[in-house]
Image (tube, coloured by chain):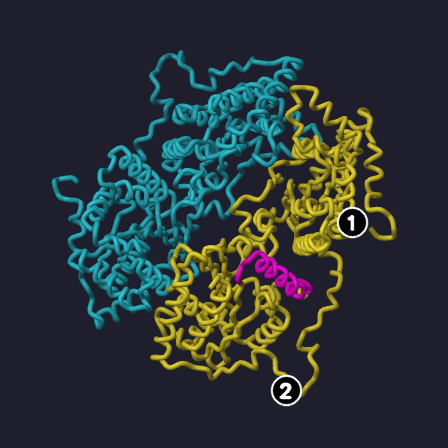
Chain colours: A yellow, B cyan
């Protein structure tokens, strides 16, 4: 595509159908197996990254047999081979990366993926007249996804199995001619020869569009069984041996500037978001009772309607400790049928969650159409508590703004309604509520030494929150900052925004 | 049902619609909340059992609101409220308890279940002419399930919300009369008054059939909001405070006798299973190649057929270390499409698995129709390694034989094909293979000091295996003991048994 060099140039070597003589192979394989095992164990012990191997290529190139062999060469107990066919009805209800997110291997382990996220892109490219917009959209979401994975502890190795048209045809007919191997040939394998030129061109473009230093493509010459197996083994060995990126200074880490610093010095006229909240907003008790009952009734009516059955809803609640997240959430869930919502409190990650990219746990809790997931704290922990407390390193939380925007865009593009609420309180109100909690026999569990420690970092949390609003208040998933110094005001405002937003998404 | 006392007697108190005056309630609630929190935290800290609360009862009795309140009274972060509607298409493909197994809370935590496993039984009983066989079958599988849960760290508390016909009718019409609460009334709530007598009778019978000391029913008087909430709180508090059963000597523990001891002393004529294996069985290489290719071809053909799409298959592999489980499994998977099988190696449980009944991890891996799950070691670990090494206490592994038989019966009753293989080798062959592994650079990872330690306990493992065959070789899921001193013989025998068993299940 670039420099006038055709994308298919990368297949030149593979299409020369190189082979390895039997006698040479034996020594090579023996050495390779020992090295692969050693490297696999070293990775398991370190457990700093997982390895995800994408298996793709020309149909009938012998991918399945090679993966079987790899499982034999390495310690198969720590490898998970995953095959994805056409998405199921359930999977279709979610963003297309959902099913891959759910099955990411834990750090130290290896996953092998058949039927990866390249399916739709390859399909789009192999059409007679590929649509440029679709191709670009798919390629860019793949790049975003792989960048996120590689930065967050998942190493991605992509293998493209390739051979010449003649060799593919020969391999297929040899297998077909023997009744005991004919089952190895799938219907699509027979079609390759007919469409070889187009398949090859589509593959070339795809590899060019999605090749990156972090997640490179390797073309595996596949005409010869021994060549194919050994080339695969070598590619995996090199990947296993590659030092973790953490050792190198992350690229572009210096580029981040706090939005606060970036704002013009205007003598305090343009205040940051949390300073602009009207903390005096309040609601009298009788007004509150009326409005709450009315809004709840509307919400209850909405979610019981037939049209709601097609809408997945994500509600996110963030705010300083004691801002009233829990009690506001309960006012919402009261109007819902217990079968259709899930309230997910987010605390520190479990060992299982810790062994995977930080967004993994949230992908697991996404709602199906007709369901609501309510996150009591969320993925924003990455740029709030993890930033302030130093649990994430600066280059990790700085890139998280982009990652979060991409994540939310994927949700909204797949049809989810995403509503984010920040319940805003002032420092004195927090103190009041902390004291009240300490006095109350059944609220004292809500107040711990950690809460007091967090309070000391009030200013840092406020800066982090303001940066977050500046960088993640997107059109598809805007932030709603609601004063919660008066809890009645907060509850009614939140409910009103939810009801209005759902209304806008349901057919009238 | 028994003693001529009607089952519905247990509803007498609830149908008197007792209430608690507002002034009394305040003090009661305040005390109750503090006690509930304290008890909840004590359980979290101990983390020796989880609590599963089953919420059931007359429609329109106010269950939903009460559960909301409990979430408010306790620390909701450690409670998971789960609501199950009619089973989804996916859920229908599995045994009916599958969806409940998958969502068991971890030790220390509390789960609240709406739409529990009582749905089918209640439905069967509420019919005009209940079918006795169906009722008995459902009741007995519920009892088995709850017994297993309570014995294995899941405490089960069952709440039946009840009120008089008049109070139910009154409650429903009051809610309906106000447009802001009318949504709280579901269509089924309005039907209760019409069928009250039959509903009441069905409930009475159900409670009698499934009441047990380990998982007792509590009837919650529900006409009055305060009464309902406080009675619920008290029932939960009592459950949280109940000491763990582990402290008491397990009932019936003394009843178990080893099948070896139970066998008549016949002077060694009737040998135990592993002594009866013909270890000399072997296969020449050329014969092996032919038969393997032929059987693989048949298997490949079977699993690619349309009819296979309705059959879920579970393959279990057990045997002494170095019996050749891994290599046999690979001979099978070679014939399969990677999309339709999962090979699951079973090692020591993860912390997540350890916090739940031992069968939990296996429920999570069951195949859907058209899929195979291949377990490389399995739930039989409970009566093999856990017994021999003392990881399970005697009363735990002794009752496991029954639990395993029940588990496998549930699988086969739901239509799964379950095949269990023991690859049998002699002690000298194991030694040979251990030595060979030590010498081979790419097999040395397969041999650890633990393997040598296990070898020292060869005799204990053999006794455990023989007991296992005696107690779990059932008609629905028989054991196939295959000599594996000659690996070629083992591989071909196993493949043959699989092919034959699948053939028998596919329409001809």
Q: How many marks?
A: 2
Q: Is residue B57 above or below residue B390?
A: below
Of labels 2 and 1, the one closer to you: 1
A491 w.r.t. B35: above or below: below
- Depth check: give the residue in front, B424 or A298: A298
Instruction: Answer left or right for A241 relative to B505.
Output: right
Alpha carbons under labels 2 and 1: distance apart: 49 Å
Give the x, y percent position of residue B228. 25, 61
Q: Are marks 2 and 1 on the same chain?
A: yes
Residue at x-position 65% and y-position 55% = A152
State the mark number for residue A208.
Answer: 1
Magenta residue check for B46: no
Viewer can see residue B444: no
- The local secondary structure at tag 1 comes to helix
Residue matched to label 2? A269
- Residue A271 at least partly seen: yes
Q: Residues within 10 Å of mark 1 (few under 14, many from 20)?
A: some
> Residue at point 60% right, 30% down?
B336
Tell me which label, 2 or 1, sits earlier in the chain.
1
Out of A8 and A244, give the one closest to the viewer: A8
Question: For the magenta stretch, what is the residue range?
Answer: A395-417
CB of mark 2 within 8 Å of CB of mark 1?
Answer: no
Does the magenta-highlighted stretch encompass residue A407?
Answer: yes
Label 2 crowd (10 A; few <14 / some 14-19 / many >=20): few
| Picture coordinates of residue B308, whole percent (x, y) | 52, 29
> Which quadrant of the structure image shows residue A183?
top right
Which secondary structure, mark 2? loop
Q: Main SS type for the magenta part?
A: helix
């Amino acid at each position: 595509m670039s420099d006038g060099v055709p994308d298919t140039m990368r297949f030149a070597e593979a299409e020369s159908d190189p082979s390895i003589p039997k006698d040479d192979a034996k020594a090579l394989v023996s050495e390779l197996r020992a090295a692969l095992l050693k490297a696999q164990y070293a990775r398991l012990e370190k457990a700093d990254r997982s390895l995800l191997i994408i298996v793709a290529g020309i149909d009938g190139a012998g991918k399945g047999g090679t993966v079987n062999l790899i499982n034999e060469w390495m310690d198969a107990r720590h490898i998970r081979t995953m095959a994805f066919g056409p998405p199921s009805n359930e999977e279709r209800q979610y963003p297309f990366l959902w099913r891959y997110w759910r099955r990411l291997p834990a750090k130290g382990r290896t996953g092998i993926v058949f039927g990866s996220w390249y399916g739709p892109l390859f399909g789009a490219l192999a059409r007679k007249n590929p649509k440029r917009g679709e191709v670009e959209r798919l390629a860019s979401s793949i790049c975003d996804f792989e960048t996120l994975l590689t930065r967050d502890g998942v190493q991605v190795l992509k293998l493209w199995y390739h051979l010449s048209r003649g060799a593919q045809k020969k391999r297929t007919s040899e297998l077909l001619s023997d009744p005991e191997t004919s089952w190895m040939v799938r219907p699509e394998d027979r079609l390759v020869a007919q469409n070889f030129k187009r398949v090859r061109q589509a593959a070339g473009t795809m590899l060019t569009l999605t090749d990156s230093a972090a997640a490179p493509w390797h073309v595996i010459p596949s005409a010869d069984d021994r060549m194919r197996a050994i080339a695969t083994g070598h590619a995996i060995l090199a990947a296993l041996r590659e030092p973790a990126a953490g050792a190198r200074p992350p690229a572009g880490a210096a580029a981040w500037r706090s939005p606060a610093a970036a704002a013009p010095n205007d003598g305090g006229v343009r205040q940051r978001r949390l300073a602009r909240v009207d903390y005096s907003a309040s609601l009298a008790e009788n007004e509150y009772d009326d409005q709450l009952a009315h809004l709840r009734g509307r919400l209850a009516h909405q979610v019981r309607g037939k049209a709601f059955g097609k809408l997945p809803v994500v509600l996110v609640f963030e705010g300083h400790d004691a801002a009233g997240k829990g009690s506001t959430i309960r006012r919402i869930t009261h109007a819902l049928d217990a079968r259709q919502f899930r309230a997910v409190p987010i605390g520190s990650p479990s060992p299982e969650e810790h062994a995977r990219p930080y967004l993994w746990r949230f992908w697991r809790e996404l709602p199906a159409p007709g369901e609501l997931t309510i996150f009591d704290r969320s993925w924003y922990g990455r740029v709030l508590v993890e930033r302030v407390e130093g649990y994430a390193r600066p280059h990790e939380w700085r890139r998280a703004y982009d990652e979060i925007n991409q994540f939310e865009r994927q949700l909204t593009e797949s049809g989810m309604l995403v509503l984010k609420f920040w319940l805003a309180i002032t420092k004195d109100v927090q103190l009041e509520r902390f004291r009240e909690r300490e006095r109350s026999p059944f609220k004292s569990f809500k107040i711990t030494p950690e809460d007091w420690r967090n309070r000391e970092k009030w200013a840092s949390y406020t800066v982090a929150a303001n940066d977050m609003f500046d960088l993640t208040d997107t059109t598809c998933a805007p932030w709603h900052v609601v004063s919660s110094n008066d809890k009645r005001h907060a509850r009614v405002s939140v409910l009103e925004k939810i009801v209005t937003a759902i209304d806008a998404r349901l057919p009238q």
